[in-house]
Every structure is written in structure tokens, then in C-alpha cells.
Image (cartoon, grey):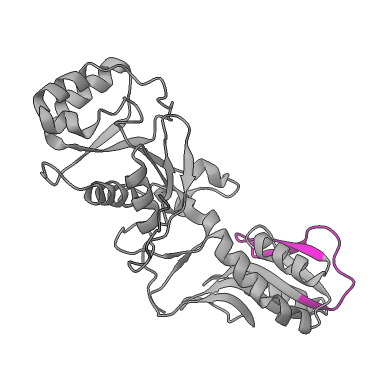
Amino acid sequence: MLPKPSLDRPSVRPTVLDHSQIALRAEALAPALRQADYEAIVCILRGGLHLAAHAAFATGLPLHFLRYSRDERGVAWHGPPPEARRLLLCEDFAGKGFTLLDCEAYLRRGGFQVETLVICVDALSASQPRWRLFQAAHPEERFLLPWERHRRNPLAADSPAGVADHTLRRTAWDLDGVFVADLEAHHYRNDLRAALSRRDTLPLAEFAPRPSPDELIITGRPESDAERTLEWCQRVGVQLRVLFRDDQRDWPTPEEVARFKADRALALGCTDYVESDATQAALMAQTYPQLRVTWWNEGRPALLQAALLGRSFHFQIKR
């Protein structure tokens, strides 16, 4: 069996699927599902819910639910079972475990005819469903579904059953423009020493967040600014761990700073990054879709999704 790459290594970037991609593929498959003459849709809770809802709306078929216990490998109906015999069983992923196999076997023992539909299949999948929206193009390719970003948190692997997924989100924050008002770049270029001295006297920003103690700051400030930065944090009451840029570059580009922040956040198992600079936020969202990126926007946060336009694309500006 092929080893599964760790999602905690920033060098291994899974193919991240978003809701719109999944919805479009499901809609494209709808005519074939209608022609297959299924009589009911069965969803494996919770992972199959998103896909099963699409399939039910696309076919007009009734929707039923199964519960699965991974610890006991137990399957049971959640609500009444269907009276129909020909079923389409929906799950989000054909994984290397037993969920899909056990649920399918349970239905067959009950006298149902069953075929399966999943969002994605890769080289480690223990079964090969008849229908899939996405198929891994090569053995090392892995998928990350939009509701699975919490898996990047190292605590997710050891969390007990029943722990809410959102409690496993881990956020890294920008510093300038989030906790302190951001000085414009020309101040630093015109007189760096004066700009740094002015920055050291600034108060905590009115739009600063109140993060939980286990979150952290990953800043584009260089390590040479660490001492004065930590003194400022102590003075204004920011008690988070702060990580500094360590490339020793005096004037890095926005792309380089964004890459540093995102790479470090992913290496530490963060699921979210909150960035003050719109350019850097867009670069992160475009390049690191496995990271949920928020533009802070002076306390009016906006969740971003971005894609790079082709180089041949030109905007025409009306004058």
C-alpha cells in the first residue's frame, strides 16, 4: 500500500476542492444519475450529506440516512429506512478505511441493491465506487475537502469522537494592520529609524481582535525587530506567541512575505491565516487553498478565495 503523504508538511499540498467545484461536478453528473433509475438516495452521516443533498435535488429522489460508528464499525438507520430497493449510497470520500464498505455491506444484507457515489477517489481508496466526481491523477495526489481543513491541526488526529470540528481550527494572525495600525511603506523607506520609533509608540488598534491564547502571530517583521516588538506586545497586552521572518531580507516583496507567512502557518498545523494587506491575502488565497485566508480590513474581515488569471488576460479600462 502506498504511504499517505502527511498534510502537516507544507511541501505536500493536497488538491483542495471547494464547494462550487463539487456542485458543478455533481450537476454535470445529474443526467446520468437520473437515467440509472435509482429509487432512493442514502447518505452516510455526516460526510455524505453535501453530496447526497445534491444528488437528491438532481434526481428528485427521497433522501435517507445511515449512521456509522468507526470504533465499533456499526451501521444503523437514522430515521426510517427506504421502502425502495434500488439505492444510491453517498459518501464524501472513498477512503482507505471501512466506512463505505461496511455501509454498503449492511444495505446488501438488508436486501437492497446498492451502488455508490463519492466526491473523490485516490490511490489509497479501499473501494472503487461506480460514480465519483474527482479521481486522483497520480498515486501521490491527495484531496482536501472544504469541511476538512481542521485536519491540518495536529490535535485532530488524537481528538476523541464527538469533538466539534470548528474547535480544531487554529488561526495565525498578522501583526501590523491587525493588532496595530499599519504605517504606510514610504515612512519606512524615507526614514527607517524614525518609522520604527514611531511604530513602537502606537497603541493597540481599535480594530484589534481578541484571539484565544493558543493562537499565534506570524509577522513579516524580521527577527532583528523581535526585541522591540515583544516589548510593544507586553506593553499593550498582546500575549500571543510571535514568529518573525528569518530570511534577513531588508525589503522583501509582498509575494515573498506572503509565502513566508503561509508556509510557516501550514508547517505549524494552522487552518486559518488572517492578513491585513489585501495583496498578500489574495496571494495566499491563490497559492495556498488549503489555508482559509481572511483579509482583516481594519476589523471588517472578508473571507477570500482567489485564482490567478492567465498572463494573456488584459483588463480594458474605460476612460
Q: Which residues are magenta?
A: 63-87
Quarter residue 238 falls in: top left
Give the residue at x 80% y 64%. Answer: 63
Eyeballing the image, is 81 above or below 114? above
- Residue 100 in view: no
> In the shown orientation, is residue 154 left or right of residue 36?
left
Eyeballing the image, is 180 above or below 266? above
Residue sitting farthest toward the front: 319
Residue 180 image offset from top left, x and y in percent: 31, 25
Considering depth in this image, is 106 or 234 the residue closer to the camera? 234
Give the residue at x 20% y 48%. Answer: 253
Give the residue at x 37% y 73%. Answer: 3
Q: Is residue 68 rendered magenta in the image?
A: yes
Considering depth in this image, is 131 or 221 the residue closer to the camera? 221
Considering depth in this image, is 254 or 37 the residue closer to the camera? 254
> In the shown orientation, is residue 173 left or right of residue 124?
left
- Residue 315 in view: yes
Q: Is residue 174 rendered magenta in the image?
A: no
